Image (cartoon, rainbow, N blue to C red):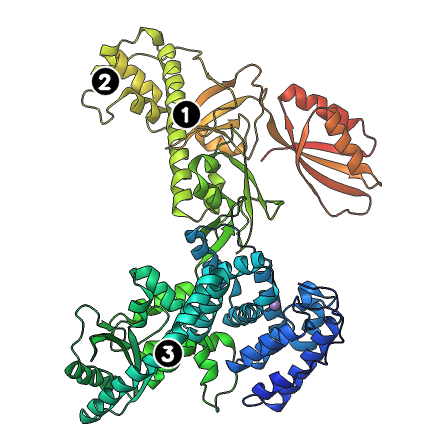
Amino acid sequence: MTTPAPAQIPKQVTSEPLLAVASSYLRHADLEALERAFQMASRAHEGQFRKSGDPYITHPLSVATILAEWHLDAQALVAALLHDTVEDTALTAGDILRQFGKSVSELVDGVSKLDRLEFQTEQQAQAENFRKMLLAMARDVRVIMIKLADRLHNMRTLDAMSGDKQRRIARETLDIYSPIANRLGLHRVFQELQDLGFRFLFPNRYQVLTKAIKAARGNRREVVNKILLAINPRLTSFGVEAQVTGREKHLSSIYNKMLDKSLSFSQVLDIYGFRILVKDVPACYLALGALHTLYKPIPGKFKDYIAIPKANGYQSLHTTLFGPFGTPIEIQIRTHEMHKIAEAGVASHWLYKSSDTPLSDVQQKTHQWLQSLLEYQSESGDAVEFLEHIKVDLFPDAVYVFTPKGNIKSLPRGATPVDFAYDVHTDVGHRCVAAKINNELAPLRTPLSNGDRVEIITEDNAAPNPAWLNYAVTAKARSKIRHYLRTMLLDESVQLGQRLLNQALRALKAAPESIRDAQWEQLLKGDRCKTRAEVLAEIGLGRRLNVVVARTLLSRSDLPVAEGQQSITIRGSEGIAVQFAHCCRPIPGDPIIGIIRKGQGLLIHTQDCRAIRQYRSDPDKWVDVEWENATGKMFDVAIKLMVLNRRGVLATVASAIANAQSNIDSVSIAKPDGTYTEINFTVQVRDRAHLAILQHQLREIPEVVRMTRVQN
Ligand code: MN
C-alpha cells in the first residue's frame, strides 16, 4: 500500500475538492467536522504514499468525495476520511471515538473489519456467500457504501499496480463488489466497477472493443437520430409527455451480451437502446402502447418490471422492437421516480432527500428506502414477498463463518460450534468435544459471529451430550442429537431390561437360560409389544415390572418370590438408562438402590438418601442393585472443607488431592469469614476406598479443621 517517497516534492493536498461538493448540501458545522477529520487523517498518513507516487491522503479524500457526490451524511464522510487510519497509522479507535463520537468510530471499525476479511476461494457459490457475509457484517448500510467508494477509487487508480495485482483485484471486484452495488441498486457504481473490472481483467479484449465502438459511433449516431425523430411525434400524438434519450451501451455489458447470447460484436452493436422517462405509471403503459403502434414488438421480449420489480427495487417496462432498418431497438420506459432508484438505489435516499427532513439515523433511512420501494409497487401483490427478499439480503438473519479451509458456511443467527459441527458432518457433530474460534479454544455453547473462523476438535469415542440440546439451534443438529440419544437410550434400556428380567426369573427360582422361544412367542401373542427387545426396553425404562413379565413367561401367576433375591449389578458405565443421582452422588462401595423412573430407566441413589424415602414403601418403584467389582470408572464426589485462612492453603489442598491420584473437577471458595474459609470441591474417585485415602491425605493438612462429604 505504501511506497518510498517519490523524488519530486509532492504538491500540497487540501480538502478543497471534497468541501466543494459537500457544501452543496451539508451544514456549516458538518463542513467544519470534515475539515477536522481531513487534518487528522493528513497528519496520520503523513509520509505514506500510494503506488502512483501520490501522498496517501489523496485516497481517503477521493473516497469521501465520491460519497459526497452520493450526498451521504457527514458521519459517513468523516468515517471515509479516516477509514484507513486505524489499520495503517498510529491513530486508534479510541482517538476517533473521542474526536468524532460513537457513530463515526463504529463506521470506521466496520470498514476496517471488512478490510481484514480475506476472500480466498474461486468458487462461484463461495462468492455469493462472501457477499452475504459482507452485508451481514456491515449492519450499517453506510459501511458498505464507504467500502464501495473505497473500491471504486482503488479501481480508478489501478493503473499503478502490477499486472498480477490488477487481475486479482479486478476479479474480486467483479465477483464481490459490483454484484453488491447491483444488489443495492447503485446502478452507476455497478456499471463503472464492471467496466473497470473488465478493462483490467481482459486488457486486450477491452482495447479491441473500445476501438470498435469508437469506429462505429458516427454511423450509430445517425441511426439514433432517425429513430428519435420517429418516436417523439408518436408519443406526442398519444398525449404522452416524455423525455427520450438514446443510450450508449457500456463496454462490459456489450462484452457480457456477446458471451451470454453468443453474438458477434456487430450483432450486439446493432442493437439500439432508448430510455423514455414519463411522469407516472399510466403514462408508462400508454407510451408502451404508442411505441407498439410505431414498430412491431419482438415476441417474448416484453418484461413488466413495474408490476414485478427486480430484487434491488429496479422498475421499468422493457420491450424490444423491430426498428426501421430491421435492427432491434431496446426500449426502457419508466417514471422519473423509478429512474432515480434505477440509477442510485439505496443512495437515492441520501441524494434526493427533501431538505426539511433532518439527517436522521441510517436504519431509518434504509427503512425509508425500502418503504419507498414498497410504495412504488403497492399495486402488485408481491410487495410483501419482495420486501422480505430485500431484507434477507440487507439484514440477513444468518451468520457467515469460515471453515479452517476458508470455505464459508451460513448458519442461523445464534448458532454455536455444535451446529457448525453437525453442518460439516453428522460424525463430526457426534464426536465433537471442543471448538476453536479464531484459533482460541471456546466453549461449545458460544454463539458464533460473522467472520469467525471455526475449527472443531473431535475424539473417536466421544458422544453427544444431552446438554447440547440447550444451545444447538439448527434443526439438523437438534434432530441428530435427539436421534442419537433415543437410540442409545433404547439400546441401553434393552440391556438393563434383560438384567432386570434375569433377576426376577432367578428370584422365581427359574434359570434365565431355561426360557425357550416358545415361551416368548406365547407372551408376545396378544401383547402390544411386537418383539422381545421391545418388552425388554419397557422393563429397562420402568414401564413394566420385571416380576410380572417373569411370571407371564413362566405361565405361573401365583409363583412366590424367593427370599434373598439377587440384585443386579451396576458398572457405572451404563450411560443413559442408568444414571447416578446428583443429590447423594453414590460411588462404588456405597450401599445403593435403583429407583425406577417411568420411561427414563434407573436412577441410582445411596440407600440412606433422603430423596428416596417416599419410594421405599412401594416395591414396584425400586430394585435392588449393587456395585460390580472394580468398575474402572471415576465418580464425582462433593467435599466441603473448612480451613484456616493462611496463605497458600488452597495450593496445599490441591496438591494433597493430586497426591491421592484424584482429579479436581471444580472448586468454589466461600467468602472468608475472619479465621476460616469454606472450600467446596468436586473431585473424582474410583470408590469408597479411594475416597478414604483422599480424606486421610486431607486430614494431614494442619489448616484443615473440618471435612465433610456433601450428600443431599
Ligand atoms: Mn482504502
Q: Residue at x 68, y 83 (%)?
A: 35
Judged from the image, the secondary structure of the residue bearing numbered disc 2 is: helix
Dot 2, crowdedness within 10 Å: few (<14), some or many (≥20)? many
**Mark 2 or 1, which is nearer the eye?**
1
Q: Residue at x 45, y 52 (%)?
A: 126
Nearest to N terminus: mark 2 or mark 1: 1
Dot 1, crowdedness within 10 Å: few (<14), some or many (≥20)? many
Distance between mark 3 and mark 1 Cα atoms: 82 Å
Q: Is residue 413 visible?
A: no
Pick the quarter of the image with the C terminus.
top right
**x and y, in percent, of residue 575 in the image:** 48, 28
Asked if ligand 1 lies within 8 A of label 2, the reply is no
Check disc 1 and report the residue beneath it.
492
Amino acid at circle 1: Glu
Q: Is residue 568 visible?
A: yes
Amino acid at circle 3: Arg
- The disc at residue 523 is 2
- The disc at residue 217 is 3
**x and y, in percent, of residue 382 in the image:** 27, 69
**x and y, in percent, of residue 528 in the image:** 22, 27
Nearest to N terminus: mark 3 or mark 1: 3
Amino acid at circle 2: Leu
Q: Is residue 57 left or right of residue 542?
A: right
**x and y, in percent, of residue 299 in the image:** 16, 70
Q: Is residue 331 above or below residue 570?
A: below
Pick the quarter of the image with the N terminus.
bottom right
Numbered label tally:
3
**Mark 3 or 2, which is nearer the eye?**
3
